[in-house]
Amino acid sequence: MLEPLKQYVAQHRTQLAKFLTVGLITFGINFFSFHFFFGVAGWDYRIAVSLAYVITVTSHFWLNRFFTFSASEQRILHNVGKYLLLLPLNYGVTLAVVGLVVEVAGLSPYLGVITSTLATSSVSFLILKHFVFKSGASWQSS
């Protein structure tokens, strides 16, 4: 069972490394955007979180489109539409994982957030690679 996973990781190691790099960058964007809106500007944390989320999601899309998956030749509207489908899925996974960690395992919500980030990252890579930015797709521009 682990052998197919090892082969997949070996075959896609460059994209996985790029995806992890983008993940670290977008984590930084999220953290510093939140800090700016909340810590510097003094806005309500809910507004700060929301604005940081929009900035982070937008950065995540563009960095993955151009850097991780080299999908700049694809039509943007197809990528954006499919990416928007990913967002509620990731949100649902986040809520489910945090809920399991906190309510079932009785652990810290901080551990839940870290665990859910790992879970959504795994799901996101597969969906971005094989659905949102699928190479050789019929929606590529000429």
Image (cartoon, grey):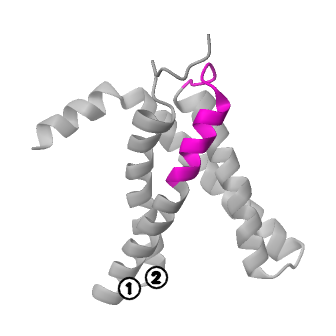
Hey, which quadrant is residue 73 in on the image? Answer: top right
Q: Which residues are magenta?
A: 70-86
Residue at the location (28% across, 29% down)?
Answer: 10
For the N terminus, the image quarter is top left
Q: Earlier in the sequence, mark 1 or mark 2?
A: 1
- Counting from the top left corner in percent of width and height, residue 65 is at 60, 33
Q: Is residue 128 magenta?
A: no
Q: Nearer the viewer, residue 135 or 45?
A: 135
Q: Amino acid at mark 1?
A: Val
Residue at the location (83% across, 70% down)?
Answer: 37
In the image, is 6 to the left or to the right of 88?
Answer: left
In the image, is 18 to the left or to the right of 118?
Answer: right
Q: Residue 108, relative to residue 136: is it above or below?
A: below
Q: Which residue in the rendered view is the most extreme toward the left? A: 1
- Counting from the top left corner in percent of width and height, residue 78 is at 59, 34
Residue located beneath label 1 in the image: 102
